[in-house]
Image: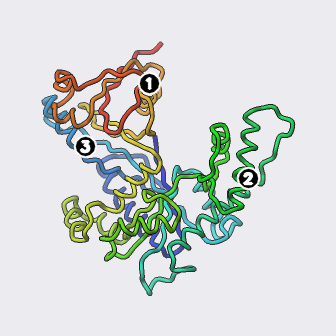
Amino acid sequence: MNLSVGIVGLPNVGKSTLFNALLKKQQAFVANFPFATIEPNVGIVPVPDARLLQLSEVVKESEKLDFLPPLVPATVEFVDIAGLVAGAHKGEGLGNKFLSHIRQVNAILHVVRGFSDPDIVKEGSVDPVSDFEVIETELMMSDYQTLEKQKEVKGSGDSYEKARWSAVLKLKAAIEKGIPARKVELGEEEAKAARELSLLSMKPMLIALNIDENALRQTEELEKRYAEAFGVETHQVVAVNAKVESDLAEFSDEEQKDYLADLGVNQSGLERIIKKGFSTLGLITFLTAGEKEVRAWTIKDGTVAQNAAGEIHNDFVKNFIKADVVDWEKFVNAGGWKNARDKGFVRSEGRDYIVKDGDVIEFKIGSGS
């Protein structure tokens, strides 16, 4: 599945600096892995995954190749959504454009200012919570307009229509109290109907707290403190320094490790954003390993093997026979598919097997009709 994250924020909070760092990552990525033309306001970056190189080295040795199979990591698409100001839901600034772009992404990354710089003009308060509340309010006000346009189909005995109208009433009542749509408890049918409304405040979200460089050693403490202040879970807040991320994009992998170590952190902000994004969205990756390529595939946690096969090719769903599955560590320790089978590490799983993060899978697919 394609994962897209819309980056939003008020003026001068560091959103553009962070996005430009992502673009540098994208340029380095595309140099090695060609993709279709990417729009200027979109950055497609690889999901860091050390497992891929280990798998590739094992495949090279076990298959007696004179080359490493290409690595194809999972990717995240970051969309720079510009134009947010207070009043966006009424068309202020580039409000309508902002709202249409945000409807198309899977999740929202709010960038809020937590750094001090007297030379940078700050619109409104210097409080990160205030930044967040402005953004949340705009999303909820836009949703309220959407809900106001909904009409009850009176006298309808259709169960779906009843669920739809029930969801509309619950969501309107919540937003009137300042509660975003994602926090409203809905029944299964209500939730299905609500998803078709494409409400902005229903989208999963992360908050990037753009802090001073000298505060990076306190990221864990700051994330816990501000998660409480924002009223969200700790895994939804990522403390980063946008300028550091921009600098890192210019360095080699080894230089990045040394630079981060000097700052007292062991992962870049981008890595942590992606990791927390996967957690927030309930995503995992399974792996395929062969001579052609070693690749990571993104799926929803809880996906069954038959549907996971569909990520590789749509026809694999209807022609699915079985899946040979082995944990990636056992695959590496055994030294490839043949040895893993000989050691009894490979399991033959049916269509309803729930795929786990780090499963290395070889799908057996029929020829079809």
Tell which residue pokes out farthest to the top in this image.
Answer: 369
Q: Quadrant of residue 247?
A: bottom left
Percent position of residue 160, x then y:
72, 35
Q: Earlier in the sequence, mark 1 or mark 3?
A: 3
- Up the image or down, 100 lies above or below 341; here it is below
Horizontal side of residue 206 vs 168, given as left or right: left
Please report the residue visible at 16 percent of the width from the left and 28 percent of the height from the top.
63
Alpha carbons under labels 2 and 3: distance apart: 45 Å
Packing grade of label 3 (10 A; few <14, some 14-19, many >=20) is some
Q: Residues within 10 Å of mark 1 (few under 14, many from 20)?
A: few
Amino acid type assigned to the residue bearing label 2 in the image: Leu
Callout 2: few (<14), some (14-19), or many (20+) C-alpha neighbours within 10 Å?
many
| Cα–Cα span, label 2 and label 1 | 38 Å
Q: Please provide percent x and percent y for residue 278.
A: 42, 49
Q: Which mark is residue 352?
A: 1
Task: Residue under label 2, please give it.
Answer: 147
Location of residue 308 with respect to 319 vertically, above or below: below
The image shows a total of numbered marks equal to 3
Question: Is 157 displayed left or right of 171 in the figure?
Answer: right
**In which quadrant of the rendered view does residue 146 lie?**
bottom right
SS at badge 3: helix
The residue identified by callout 3 is 51
Mark 1 secondary-structure assignment: loop
Q: Earlier in the sequence, mark 2 or mark 1?
A: 2
Earlier residue among tags 2 and 3 = 3
Q: What amino acid is at disc 3?
A: Arg
Q: Position of residue 167 (x, y in %)?
A: 70, 45
